[in-house]
Image (tube, grey):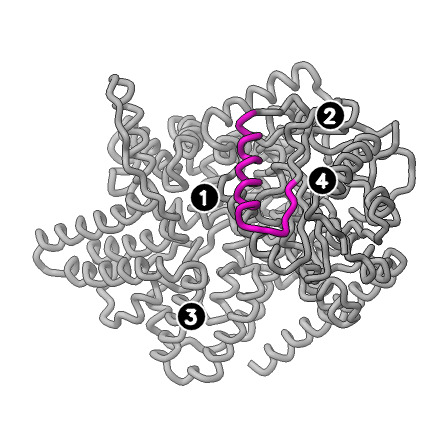
Amino acid sequence: MLFNSFAFFVFFPIVFCLYWFVFNKSLRWQNVLILIASYFFYGWWSYRFLGLLVLSTLLDYYFGFQVASANKKKSKFFLWLSVINNLGILGLFKYFNFFITQFQQGIELLGFHTNPVLLSVALPIGISFYTFHGMSYVFDIYRGHQKPVKNYIDYAVFVSFFPLLVAGPIERAHHLLPQVQSRRTFDYKQAIEGCRLIIWGMFKKVVIADGLASYVDSVFNNYQFENGSTLVVAAIAFSFQIYGDFSGYSDIAIGTAKLLGFELLSNFKFPYFSRDIAEFWRRWHISLSSWFRDYLYIPLGGSRNGRAKAIRNTFIIFLISGFWHGANWKFIAWGFIHACGFLPLLLLNRNRKHVTDIVAQNRKYPSFKELSQMLGTFAFVTFAWVFFRANPGIESALLYLKHICVSLYHNPIQLPRLKLLLAYIIPLILFDWWWRRDERSLKKMYYLVYIIMGIAIYVKLGANNSFIYFKF
Amino acid sequence: MRRFLIKISQYFLLLILLIFLLISSMLWINRKINLPFTSNSVSFNAKAKFIHEHESLFNRSKFLIIGSSMSLNNLDCQQIQDSFKTPVINLSSWGMKPADFDDFNIWTKDKTIMMDLYFEDFGESDIKKNFGYPLSQNKFIDYVDVASDFYTYLACISMYKEYIRKDESRDYSYLVFDATGTILFNDPQFVISKERWNFSKAVFSEKDMADYVDFIIKKSKLVNKIIICFSPGRRIQYSSLRSNSVKGIEKSIMENCKNVIFINKYDSDMPESDFVDMCHMRGSGAKRFTADIINDLKKDKNFNVN
C-alpha cells in the first residue's frame, strides 16, 4: 500500500480510530492492532511475501533469546546464525542473480560456457529495511544494550511497524522497542505535528518529486539525444526528485507514527545545505548511515587503529552502503565516489568539522564561503547521483557524463524548461532554509500554506508514482 | 483528542470546500469545450464527445469503423458510405484497441464492424476508464470522474485545446474529426516528423497477436460481420517474416470465424508519397487504400452490409 494512495487514505483513519477509541485501554490490544494493520499494509502489496516477513521476524525473535545466553560461544554462534539468516534472505532475493551473472561473466572470460539458473522472483518490498531491523535487535542484545523481548507481538511490531516497514527510517531496538512496550497516551501537540509532517511529506513526494519525475525520466532515458545543458539540469532535477521522494516518505512515516504516539528516528536534516561530504552523510538517510557506523564501521575499528585502517573502513562502509541500494555496479560506483569525496576530509582530520551546527546557524543568510561550500558539495553529490540514476548501468552514467562534456563544449548556452523546474525546486529550498535550525518546527507555518499544500497534493495525486526507495 | 478531531475536521472541511470550488470553476471555465472526462485518454474522450454530438448518426449506423489512428487516418468513411449507401461512423481514435469499444456497446448482431490494423495495434490498451459510462450524460458521475482524477482532467483539457486548433500547422496531433468521425491528412503542408517517418517497432509479441485472434473469435459471434484490413505500411519496413505473421493471423481467424472478412494488404505496394509516416497515410493514400478495400468487399460474396 502506498502512502499516496486512496487505499491508505481509507486504511489509516480506520486504524487511528480503532487504536485510540476501541483499544485505547489495553496496550496489548493496541499492539495487536498495529501488528494486524502492519501485516495488512504489507499484504496489500503481496500476501505471498508476508510469509517471508513473518519467518524473518520469528527467526530473529528466537535468535535474540539464544544470543542473550550466558554462554559466550553459544551467544556468538547464534549471532552469526542471525547475520547469516538475514543476509541470506537479502542475498537470495536481492543479490542472487547479480552474483550468478558476475560469476558467469568471469567464467566466460576464462573460455568456459555456462548456462546459469536465475531467479525470476520480484524483490520483496522493504526487505532491506526489515532485515536490518532484525539484525540491529540481535546486535544490541549481543552487546548488552538490549534485553530480549519476551512478548512476540511487541517484537513483531518493532520489525513490522507499518509506517517504517517498507522504506524506513531504519529503527533501533533500544529506541523503538521501549515505546512499543510502554503505554501511549494521545498528545495533541504530537498529533498536530504528525499531521503537518504528513502534509509536508506528501507535498514533497506528490508535488515536487513526482513533478520532476517525468522530466528526469524522459531525459535520462534518452540522454543520447539531449544537449549538455539539458543533461545538467536533469541531473540537478534528479537530486531534488530523490530528496523530495525519500525525505517526503520519511516525513509521512514519522508523521503517521506520531499520530499513533510513537517518535521515530530522523532520517533527513536538510542534506543539501551541507558544507562538505562528511556533513552530507550526517544529514542524508541518517538512519542507514548511523546503522552502518554503529554496526559495521565501529566494530571494524573505525578510525582508531591508524590511518590505513580508517581509510579501509571508510571505503568498506561506503561501498557496502552503495551495494545495499541495489545489485548493480552503478550503486557500488556511487558509494565509491562518495568514499573518494570523504577521503580528503578524513586525511585532513576535517570530517567532524560540522557535527552539531547548521549553516548560517545564527544568521538569516549564509556567508559567501558557506554558499560556495554548499554549492560545491551539492555539485559533487549531483555528480554521484548520475551514477545512481543512470540506467541500465555504470556505462550509461559514463556516457551521460561524456555527453554533458562534449555537448557543453560545442553548445554551452541552452537552458531547457528552467522555469518549470525552478517552480518545483525553489519552494523546496526556501522551506528547507526556513526550517533548517529545527526540522520539526513546522508549527511556525501558516495554516494557509498547509491549505495550499493540501490543494496542490490533491491536484497532483493523479500522477501516482511509487516511491523510489521501495526498490531498495 | 476532541480538540484534535475538531482541528483536523476544520482543515479537511475547508480543503474539501476549496477543492469543490476549484473543480466547479474549472468545469465552468471549460464548459464550452464540453469534453467528457470518461477516461485518461484525450482521444477516447474526444471520440466520446463526437458520439454525443452525432448521436443520431451513431444510432443509425449499422456499419461502424473501430480501431486506432490506423482506422482514423487510413479509412475514408465518406467513400465507404457513398459506395454502400449506408450511414457509416468512424469510432476509432488514437491508441484505441478493439477492446476499448466495449464501452460503446457496439458488439450486437445488427452491426458490421470494420477496422484497419497494423503491428502497433496488438497488445493491451493503455486507456483507463473512469466511473462514468462514456455515452451517459449524468452530471453527478461527470463530477465524480473529474474529482477522482483532477490532474488528468486538467491535462486532457489542456491537450484537447492544443489538438483542436484550427490553424494551418497540421501534424499528427490534429484532432478535428470530419462529419463521419474520420481525420484525413489532406493538407499538403502536413508536417512530417522524421522520428515517426522512420519509426518501426522491432519486436511483436506472439502472445499479443494470439490474444487479438482470440478477441476477434469471441466478438465475431456477437456481430453481423467483422472486416479486418491489414495496412501495407512503408515498403522500407517490409519483411517476409512480418508478412508470414500477418498470414498466420489471417489463417487462425478464418479457420475459426465464418463471418469475418480479412483483407490482407500488407504485401501491397503503395508509393511513399501516400504516407506521412511508417504506416499512416496521406488523404490521397487513404482514399486510394479505401477504394481498394471497397473493391475487394464488393467482390466478396459473403459481404452484405445489411
Quadrant (top left, top right, bottom left, bottom right) of the N terminus of chain B: bottom right
Question: Magenta residues, as a range?
Answer: B240-262
Q: Which mark is residue A282?
A: 1
Q: Nearer the viewer, residue B298 or A226?
A: B298
The answer to whether the residue labelled 4 contacts the one labelled 3, judged by CB atoms less than 8 Å apart, is no
Q: CA distance from mark 3 to mark 1?
A: 32 Å
Residue type at tag 3: Ala
x 77%, y 29%: residue: B276
Same-chain status of marks 4 and 1: no
Q: Secondary structure at mark 3?
A: helix
- Residue A115 placed where, x, y %? 28, 30
Residue type at tag 1: Arg
Q: Which mark is residue B70?
A: 4
> Nearer the N terminus, badge 3 or badge 1?
3
Q: Mark 2 highlights which residue?
A: B270
Q: Which mark is residue A37?
A: 3
Q: CA distance from mark 4 to mark 3?
A: 49 Å
Q: Which is closer to the viewer, label 2 or label 1?
A: 2
Residue B241 in sight here: yes
Residue type at tag 4: Met
Q: Residues within 10 Å of mark 2 (few under 14, many from 20)?
A: some
Q: Chain of mark 3?
A: A
Q: Quadrant of residue B193?
A: top right
Q: Secondary structure at mark 1?
A: helix
